[in-house]
Image (cartoon, helix red, strand yellow):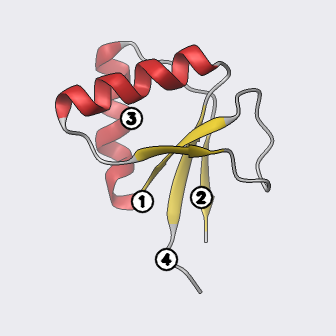
Amino acid sequence: MGEQRVVITFQTTTQAMAWERACKERGLPGRLIPMPVVISADCGVAWLAAPEELELLLSQAEELGLGYDQVVELK
């Protein structure tokens, strides 16, 4: 099986683009991906990262006021 990943979903494309911009500016890990078919969400893209990066990403999101919908673990 592949390695475990976390996917952060967004309610809007605007949220996803703000997340991507902030992460790139700060050198934070992860990347935007098309929404995996196993996840239902309002926006068609999601942020993919390794599980060990999740705490850092969410703390930075809170600090920067970045919105997101949910966090889903993929195996």
Q: Disc number at residue 73? A: 2
Disc 2 or 4, which lies upstream in sequence? 4
User: Which corner quadrant of the image does residue 26 belong to?
Assistant: top left
Image location of residue 23, percent across then percent down: 30, 32
Instruction: Pick the residue in front: 25 or 61.
Output: 25
Mark 2 and mark 1: span between their CA atoms? 8 Å
Report how far apart the C-alphas of labels 4 and 1 lie in the structure.
Answer: 10 Å
Pick out the residue farthest to the bottom: 1
x and y percent of residue 12 in the render? 65, 18
> Mark 1 to mark 3: distance in Å?
11 Å
Give the residue number, with chain letter if any, for mark 4: 3
Q: Looking at the image, which residue is at 70% across and 53% down?
A: 36
Q: Residue at x 56, y 49 (%)?
A: 7
Which residue position is annotated with label 3?
58
In this picture, residue 71 sits left or right of residue 65:
right
Q: Amino acid at mark 2?
A: Glu
